[in-house]
């Protein structure tokens, strides 16, 4: 059922790093992205994929992992993503990438979830460092990064109490994500 797939598609930040996602699987995810709708059908997004330890480290060091978890710098070695997809905007096609990145990232993550994988979208990126580390041409605007792997954590959804939207971890290291109730979201 589609709702189950959506519920399993969480923002995972800890993985079984030794679970390798092969390049063909990453290309299959890009194929899903290729088939999604695009604003004005411009299709301006391009992708860099990584599943090598050396390149993954160059990407890892450019990410801010969890803004609400102030005492956590990200996953420890052994719990880091085994792959990344960097979403780029081709500025020679357009300067406005509209809603395309959100559509493709959610599609990729749903595809990953269907295969028992998971991931996390990153917008908090040291873009200059990433461009330098990976020799990314100025033609391409670094939009987002998807970290991917076999999830190694439990993510629990719960209703928001009061107005606190901050996610948190309990003593068992389960990741709790508050969500607004349906009654709050639908206006009459």
Image: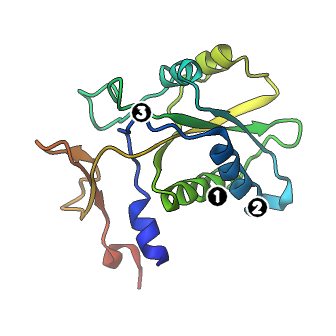
| 83 to 56, vertically: above or below | below
Q: Position of residue 151 (x, y in %)?
A: 38, 46
At numbered mark 3, what does the secondary structure look like: helix, strand or loop? loop
The part of the image, by quadrant, that contains residue 89 is top right
At numbered mark 2, what does the secondary structure look like: helix, strand or loop? loop
The residue under the point 43% across, 29% down is: 64
**Mark with earlier residue (3, 2):** 3
| 113 to 134, vertically: above or below | below
The residue carrying mark 1 is 103
Instruction: Please identify, in this view, whether the residue under mark 3 or under mark 1 is nearer the observer.
Output: 3
The residue carrying mark 3 is 17
Which numbered marker is on residue 35? 2
| 163 and 50: which is toward the camera | 50
Query: How much space separates mark 3 and mark 1, taking CA atoms?
Result: 27 Å
Q: Position of residue 30 (x, y in %)?
A: 70, 49
Query: How much space separates mark 3 and mark 2, taking CA atoms?
Result: 29 Å
Instruction: Please identify, in this view, whether the residue under mark 3 or under mark 2 is nearer the observer.
Output: 3
Quarter placement of the C terminus: bottom left
Task: Name the side, left or right, on which 168 lies relative to 100.
Answer: left
Q: Does the residue at mark 3 contact the one at mark 1 (Cβ under 8 Å)? A: no
The residue under the point 57% across, 59% down is: 111
Within 10 Å of the Cα at label 1, are there few (<14), some (14-19), or many (20+) other Cα atoms? some
| 4 and 27: which is toward the camera | 27
């Amino acid at each position: 059922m589609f709702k189950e797939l959506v519920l399993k598609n969480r923002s995972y930040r800890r993985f079984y790093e030794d679970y390798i996602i092969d390049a063909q699987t990453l290309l299959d995810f890009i194929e899903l992205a290729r088939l999604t709708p695009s604003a004005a059908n411009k299709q301006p997004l391009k992708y860099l994929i990584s599943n090598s330890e050396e390149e993954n480290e160059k990407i890892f060091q450019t990410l801010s992992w969890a803004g609400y978890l102030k005492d956590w710098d990200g996953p420890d070695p052994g719990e880091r993503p085994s792959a990344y997809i960097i979403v780029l905007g081709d500025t020679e096609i357009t300067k406005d990438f509209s809603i395309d990145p959100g559509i493709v990232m959610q599609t990729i993550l749903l595809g990953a979830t269907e295969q028992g994988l998971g991931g996390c979208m990153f917008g908090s990126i040291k873009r200059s460092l990433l461009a330098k580390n990976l020799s990314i041409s100025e033609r391409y605007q670094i939009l987002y990064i998807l970290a991917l792997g076999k999830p190694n954590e439990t993510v629990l959804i719960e209703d928001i109490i009061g107005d606190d939207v901050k996610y948190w971890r309990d003593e068992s290291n389960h990741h709790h994500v508050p969500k607004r109730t349906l009654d709050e979201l639908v206006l009459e």
